[in-house]
């Protein structure tokens, strides 16, 4: 439902799933569902702001923010517990790194949520402070996974890595749209996503292309890059024409077969 734009149904389905997983005491599923509910809450907030809709699923904007914050808090707490358990049982292992990457994703998602809803949050300063802390936590975790991945034998699937990078890119673009500076280094993320895509193209049956054709994945990356250049054009009036031309060149290139990578 979420990818079809049916936010009310997506929210209610996930809410029902959370109740079921809670009854079954399935902590892994509880953590995943809470994270997904937080992401849906962010999309609901953005839709309500864009369309000036006062309520969605019977909730006001303030209520959506409260629920989203609670979902992410629970998701992160569950992830922290799981990471500690793995560390106690296995020490610093491949499995530990996998769990760390998943937890890093949850911190990143909450950061994007809090920084996006900041102006409508009950405590804007607290929302911004927590969001920035979450971003730093995510960056530290991502770096630890990269630094220790080879040593521990954790490579990570290239399709998973590509999706992770695209998620980071879209999140940072959203924050840039809200007026935040790119302290993360989004161009490095673009380079990493392109490298992962080039690698995948050498394997016609790669997992990255199970549901989306190679050209479609290239266009996802190109669309994000166009958005990035247009944002730079809007923020840097002195280089507006230069960045606009870069965005236009990519848009024209997308009209042809995507074999440039």
Image: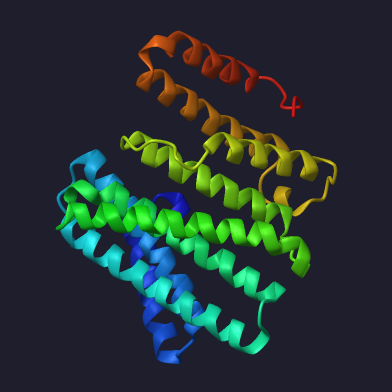
Task: Identify the residue at image location x=55%, y=66%.
Answer: 102
Q: In this view, does 88 lie to the left or right of 54?
A: right
In the rendered view, would you say 92 is above or below 245?
A: below
Where is residue 226? Give x, y as percent: 52, 26
Q: Is residue 69 left or right of residue 206?
A: left
Q: Does the image show residue 93?
A: yes
The answer to which of 72 and 93 lies nearer the viewer is 93
Rendered image coloring scheme:
rainbow
Where is residue 137? Give x, y as percent: 46, 60
Q: In which quarter of the image is residue 39?
A: bottom left
Task: Identify the residue at image location x=77%, y=38%.
Answer: 198
Task: Identify the residue at image location x=37%, y=76%.
Answer: 16
Q: Is residue 40 left or right of residue 155?
A: left
Where is residue 10? Give x, y as percent: 39, 62
Where is residue 188? Give x, y as percent: 60, 38
In the rendered view, would you say 33 is above or below 181?
A: below
Name the image quarter holding the N terminus.
Answer: bottom left
The answer to which of 137 and 172 lies nearer the viewer is 137
Q: Does the image show residue 1?
A: no
Q: In this view, does 166 lie to the left or right of 197?
A: left
Q: Quadrant of residue 217?
A: top right
In the rendered view, would you say 259 is above or below 27?
A: above
Task: Identify the residue at image location x=44%, y=71%.
Answer: 33
Name the image quarter holding the C terminus.
Answer: top right
Q: How many marks?
A: 0
């Amino acid at each position: 439902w979420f990818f079809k734009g049916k936010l009310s149904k997506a929210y209610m389905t996930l809410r029902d799933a959370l109740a079921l997983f809670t009854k079954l005491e399935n902590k892994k599923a509880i953590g995943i569902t809470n994270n997904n509910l937080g992401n849906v809450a962010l999309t609901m907030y953005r839709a309500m702001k864009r369309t000036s809709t006062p309520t969605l699923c019977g909730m006001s904007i303030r209520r959506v923010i409260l629920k989203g914050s609670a979902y992410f808090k629970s998701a992160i707490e569950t992830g922290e517990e799981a990471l500690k358990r793995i560390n106690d049982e296995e020490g610093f292992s491949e499995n530990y790194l996998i769990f760390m990457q998943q937890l890093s994703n949850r911190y990143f998602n909450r950061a994007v949520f809090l920084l996006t809803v900041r102006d409508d949050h009950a405590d804007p300063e607290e929302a911004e402070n927590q969001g920035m802390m979450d971003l730093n936590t995510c960056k530290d975790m991502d770096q630890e996974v990269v630094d220790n991945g080879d040593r521990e034998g954790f490579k990570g699937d290239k399709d998973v890595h590509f999706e992770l990078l695209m998620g980071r890119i879209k999140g940072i673009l959203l924050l840039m749209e809200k007026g935040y500076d790119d302290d993360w280094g989004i161009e490095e993320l673009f380079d990493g996503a392109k490298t992962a895509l080039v690698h995948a193209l050498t394997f016609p049956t790669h997992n990255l292309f199970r549901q989306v054709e190679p050209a479609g994945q290239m266009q996802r990356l190109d669309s994000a890059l166009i958005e990035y250049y247009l944002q730079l054009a809007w923020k840097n009036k002195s280089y507006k024409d230069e960045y606009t031309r870069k965005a236009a060149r990519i848009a024209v290139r997308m009209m042809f077969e995507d074999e440039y990578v």
